[in-house]
Image (spheres, rainbow, N blue to C red):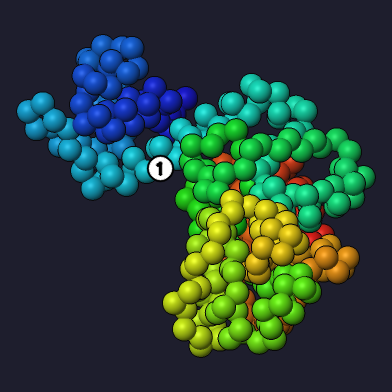
Amino acid sequence: MKKICPSITELQAFEASARHASFTKAASELFVTQGAVSRQVANLETYLGTPLFLRQSNRLILTEAGVFFLEHAQTSLRILVDASNHLASGRGQKQNITISVPPTLATQVLMPLLADFYRRHPSISLHFAPYEHTHDFAASEHLDVAIQFGEGEWPGAMSRYLIGKEQSVVCTREYAQNWCLTGPGDFRRATLLQHFNVPHAWVQWFQAFRLPGTTAHLGPSFGQYDMIIAAAKQGLGAGLVPRCLAMEALRKQELIEPVQTTALARQGYFLCVRKARSRTKVVSTFVDWITEVDLTP
């Protein structure tokens, strides 16, 4: 039978040799002899009809063709590893999805909608992994999907904006009255509650209103938006938060918006799907659901 693609052994030998720039080190990693690695790479070069390495004394240097092929070989091997781990863990048969969501968004927006998801898709279970502000999707092999807060670019993931760029400035009614907060300029004298991972939010808000931002970065910092909302409820200052997270507190009149703002934040919540998972049916089902459902609280 005619050979239609390189073997896994050849790809592994080439990829390890390219990473180490050495047949010897690649052989040590793969637990084979240096000669075996060298032969596998030579077989691959013969099949492809082009050299992949320039062999210089004790060092290997990738050719232009080698650089091109390495990127695709690594992607292919990673997909196979991901698929193998996915099935070996039992998730492939049990229709499970491992997802990571910022805690405040999970409790304020996503959790109230999960009953609808399970009603529509009773055979799929969602497993919530700990949230990290910046996931390394190339390394986070346990994740299928994540909702990330940022500007929309994460290596190793496909992203789509969901919600969160619409902002609200919130505080208690008493705080607004005590500090006479009736216009954007008045917030220069207020205590501004900062988000530890979004340190420039107030600065950008001040810039949107053409206000000097000398005090915009000052104020206590918090690691989660729910902590900022809780601090605002205690009268500790004014918070700048995604509006979707403050809706319940606003409806209950625990907080007010002393000024309305139409300035959109640069960051928001994005649905991120690992590229290696994007074509699996169970992940596609969740993606279709969350992009169609109304996320507005």
Horizontal side of residue 39 vs 218, given as left or right = left
Q: Could you say which is closer to the camera, residue 187 or residue 250? A: 187
Which residue is denoted by mark 1 in the rendering? Answer: 72
Looking at the image, which is closer to me, 99 or 182?
182
Above or below, comparing residue 134 to residue 28 in the picture: below
Q: Residue 85, image x and y in percent?
A: 59, 26
- Name the residue: 82% across, 68% down: 250
Number of numbered discs on residues: 1
Most foreground residue, 209 or 28: 209
Furthest toward the right, the residue is: 119
Q: Report the amino acid beneath label 1.
A: His
Q: Where does the C terminus fall, quadrant-wise?
A: bottom right
Local crowd at mark 1 within 10 Å, few (<14), some, or many (≥20)? Answer: few
Q: Quadrant of residue 88?
A: top right
Which of 106/48 is in front? 106
Most distant residue in the left direction: 57
Residue at 31% over, 12% down: 32
Residue 247 visible in this rendered orientation of the protein: no
Q: Quadrant of residue 96?
A: top right
| Residue 52 horizontal/vertical position (percent) | 24, 38
- What residue is at 37 percent from the left and 43 percent from the top? 71
Side of 237 where 150 appears, left or right: left
Q: Is residue 80 left or right of residue 58?
A: right
> At x 17% / y 38%, what residue is drawn?
61
Return the x and y of residue 38 as percentages of the image width and height.
Answer: 23, 21
Percent coordinates x, y for residue 7 in the rendering: 42, 26
Q: Is residue 181 visible?
A: yes
